[in-house]
Image: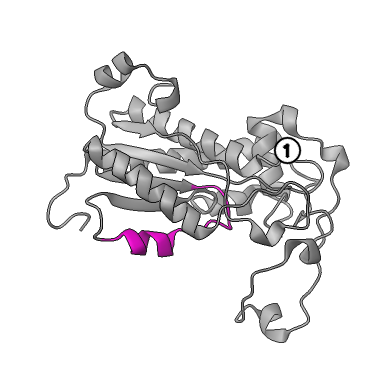
Amino acid sequence: MKGKLLEMTLKEVRDFGKVEVCVLPWGSCEPHNLHLPYGTDTFTVEKVAEISCEKANEKGGKVIVLPTIQVGVNSNHFGFPLVLHFSPTTQLAILKDIIYSLEKSKIYKLVILNGHGGNEFKALCRELYEKTPINIFLIDWWIVREDIMNMVCDDKTGEHGNEAETSWILYLYPEFVHLEWADEGKVNEPRLEGLKKGWAWIVRPWPLLTTNSGYGNPKKANSEKGKAMIEGATDTIAEFLIELSNAKIDERFPY
């Protein structure tokens, strides 16, 4: 794939010319019900980044995909085996080093393409604001075309190993899915009214919230639904990357 840094040679990087935008996919390593791999968020966001950048570059964009970060913020999933976790301070340190590296190559537009709900980068972006000449954009890819998800999914509940997420993997990596192993993704209700109504918040202890880490019923997932969601999202992200690639940085950017 043209524009995936890990697969490019020095000659190809030089021949690529001026890089306008780098995309950093960031996933996680955690269980997703009994039927999806621990790398679900990582596999999906990496492929979404690759497809989006390829579509953008085919239309004249100058976009490079950086290596995917495969571990996210997952401390509330401890209790399930082999969950891997980066603290937000670790994420900040990684971002600082990546940004420093991009500064050395005079690349001033970075898109963090997030694939995991527990990765909350806004505070980190604010921490880095005005400490770098790089303009940092954040996209939680799964919300880009929620309209398609709401249109194609029968069960719109849940958020983890559910119908939508299972459909993505069935489209991208069907060999990793064991739908016959899945439970229905039922979750326990909180005791406190504020949590039930959504105006109070707590870090949710996932082993107490869920049965086998899944949240939402995956039983009606299929690859056709996954294709509609993935292709719709990558079309939209690609258009953004083209626009960002073509945008001139001046004293008023991005306004």
For label 1, the residue is 222
Which part of the image, by quadrant, shows the C terminus? bottom left
Residue at left 28%, top 44%? Answer: 109
Q: Is residue 47 above or below residue 194?
A: above
* Residue 88 on image: x %, y %: 50, 59
Q: Is residue 191 above or below residue 58?
A: below
* Residue 154 on image: x %, y %: 73, 52
Q: In the picture, residue 45 is in which quadrant? A: top right
Confirm whether residue 208 shows in the render.
Answer: yes
Confirm whether residue 225 shows in the render.
Answer: no
123 in magenta = yes
Q: How is the image coloured?
A: one colour
Q: Is residue 19 above or below residue 27?
A: above
In the picture as drawn, the residue positioned furthest to the bottom comes out as: 193
Region rendered in magenta: 114-129
- Locate residue 140 relative to residue 209 in the image: left or right: left
* Residue 141 on image: x %, y %: 50, 48
Q: Is residue 236 above or below residue 146?
A: above
Secondary structure state at the residue bearing disc 1? loop
Choose between 6 and 151: the one closer to the eye: 6
* Residue 61 on image: x %, y %: 29, 32
In the picture as drawn, the residue positioned furthest to the top comes out as: 11
* Amino acid type of the residue tagged 1 in the rendering: Asn
